[in-house]
Image (cartoon, grey):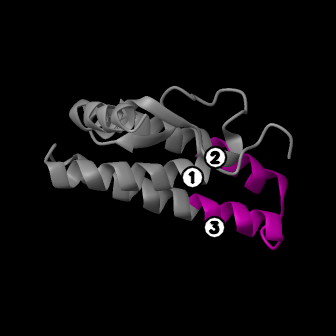
């Protein structure tokens, strides 16, 4: 498919600590609108309807797992947030070049916080 990537875009700047529940809700809503549109255009017995339903259930379940990581900002939950967020973003990757997709926020996150990002950058520089 032209304009579609297999992997979501990465952000060198955005960290797990920067993510908000609003990011989770907005990405989930963006996907649900598209999946609802597919279901609206197809009959209940069609493969398209069932595929959209299955993906919608996967998105909802993954969004719940991301939300669960917002109980606090402990190192453990920030690592879990990064992992769970990146899984949600993978489900959205086919839309990453579509109208309305927020590439600045809905991207694969590499680091849990700014300190980890700085440490990683220092290591990369030392290897040059």
Identify the image quadrant of residue 12: top left
Tell me the residue that label 3 is attached to: 54
Q: In this view, does 118 lie above or below 50?
A: above
Density class for disc 3 (Cα within 10 Å; few <14, some 14-19, many ≥20) is few
Reply above or below: 117 against 110: above
Q: Is residue 37 left or right of residue 106?
A: right
Q: In this view, which residue lies farthest toward the bottom?
A: 45
The reply to whether dot 3 and dot 1 touch (C-beta < 8 Å) is: no
46 vs 61, left or right, is right
Q: Which of marks 2 and 3 is nearer the N terminus?
A: 3
Magenta residues? 32-56
Q: Do the residues labelled 1 and 2 touch (CB within 8 Å)?
A: yes
The residue singled out by tag 2 in the image is 93
Residue 124 picture location, percent across and down: 38, 37
Estimate the x, y position of residue 128 in percent, counting from the top left: 43, 34
What is the spatial separation of the Cα atoms under label 1 and label 2, in whole angstroms? 5 Å
Q: Mark 1 points at which residue?
A: 90
The correct choice, above or below, for 8 with respect to 54 in the image is above
Is residue 38 left or right of 18 when viewed as pictured? Answer: right
Q: Can you tell which of label 2 and label 3 is closer to the viewer? A: 2
Tell me which residue sits at (25%, 36%) in the image: 119
Q: Is mark 3 on a helix, strand or loop?
A: helix
Q: Is residue 106 visible?
A: no
Tell me if residue 5 can be seen: yes
Label 3 vs label 1: CA separation? 15 Å
Query: Who's the residue at 21% across and 33% down the image?
Result: 115
Look at 46% across and 50% down and name the residue there: 86
Between the C-alphas of marks 2 and 3, the distance is 16 Å
Determine whether label 2 and label 3 are within 8 Å by CB: no
């Amino acid at each position: 498919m032209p304009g579609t990537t297999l992997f979501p875009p990465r952000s060198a700047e955005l960290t797990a600590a920067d993510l908000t529940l609003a990011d989770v809700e907005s990405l989930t809503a963006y996907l649900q609108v598209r999946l609802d549109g597919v279901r609206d255009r197809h009959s209940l017995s069609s493969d398209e309807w069932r595929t959209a339903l299955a993906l919608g259930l996967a998105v909802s379940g993954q969004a719940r797992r991301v939300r669960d990581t917002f109980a606090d900002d402990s190192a453990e939950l920030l690592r879990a947030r990064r992992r769970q967020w990146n899984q949600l973003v993978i489900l959205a990757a086919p839309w990453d070049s579509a109208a309305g997709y927020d590439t600045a926020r809905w991207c694969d996150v590499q680091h849990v916080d700014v300190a980890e990002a700085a440490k990683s950058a220092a290591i990369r520089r030392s290897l040059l």
